[in-house]
Image (cartoon, helix red, strand yellow):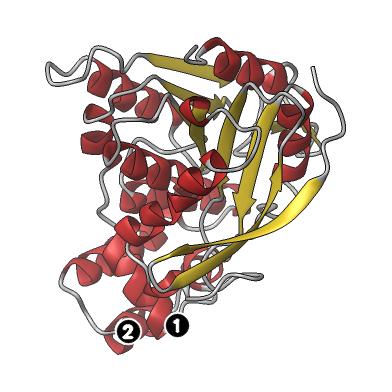
Amino acid sequence: MSTDPMPCEVGFVNGDVTLAGLVEVPDRASAGVVLVGGSGPTDRDNGTYFPPIRRHLAAAGIAVLSYDKRGVGGSSGDWRDATMDDLAADAAALDFLRTRPGVPAHAVGLFGHSEGGWVALRAATARDDLPWVVTNSCPGTTPAVQERHALANALRRAGADVDDALALYDRLVVAGRRDAAFAEAARLIDSAGSPAVSCDYWTGVDERLWAFLKRKQDHDPVPDAVRLRCPHLAIFGGADELVSVADSARLFSAAACHPDRHARATLTVQVFPGSDHRVQTNGGTRLASRYLDTLTRWILDRRQD
């Protein structure tokens, strides 16, 4: 086992976008992983979430690369202008990591957190050479369904009027499917006068973000899961209020049972009871017990010799 690998600032190119990140390559690395962040303007650390994961994996002999999303940190472009295919193509990070000295190219896979799980699944379907993929708190539902679930939980916590707020949310989703202009969506919010939706869903939404939300809202990860040609580890926190864990596990399991699923595309579902969307406990102050060991062992057990 290697300890204390030195992190290194790196940059790589996908089309006309330059992405900046951080790579750690331990001595005698036996595997590698690209960490793909969640929704919004996520950087290479996904806030404070990735560093302890990165350190643990690297100490276990796994090379790790994480990167700033388009338009964040040192990366060019703008994630709000991107499609899911664009974000998946940014997993050119995978090819970059495979070319690093000391990295076993055949044993480098993808780890996607939350929205990053959708990105990792889409990237995986475009490749025949991926040894495995990990989705971490990734919904098996569409974004529209996932956001509705998260909003309902937030409203209940706040003691707000759930039914009226969700009815407004549903009208916004329908407007998005009609490709309604931002002004029309804003009028729906203003006319409803619902501060709960404004605070929990609409805060920070402008014309460009509205366009991104419209493009993304009906993305279905199940067809990508069906097309996988490698093992899939789906990790969830049992107390995740943002994702319907039971529905997501069921949908990924159904994909694994599809007659078109590749024979190599096994599914492992790991639920950590009592942990949240970041698979953390104690009010989000620590990762769930055995989470890091479980993740590390699953990756190392799937090395291709």
Point out the tag, 1 or 2, that comes first from the N-terminus.
2
From this viewpoint, is residue 258 visible?
A: yes
> Could you say which is closer to the camera, residue 99 or residue 67?
99
Q: Residue at x 46, y 69 (%)?
A: 79
**What residue did someone put label 1 on?**
206
| Mark 2 burial class by Cα count in 10 Å: few <14, some 14-19, many 20+ | some
Query: Which secondary structure lies at badge 1?
Result: loop
Which residue, as the protein is rendered here, is positioned at the far front? 101
Q: Residues within 10 Å of mark 1 (few under 14, many from 20)?
A: few
Residue 239's image quarter?
top right
The residue carrying mark 2 is 182
Q: Amino acid at mark 1?
A: Asp
Looking at the image, residue 174 sits to the left or right of residue 277; the answer is: left
Q: Where does residue 21 sit, x and y in percent of width and height? A: 65, 57
Residue type at numbered disc 2: Phe
Residue 68 position by quadrant: bottom right
Q: Nearer the viewer, residue 241 or 269?
A: 269
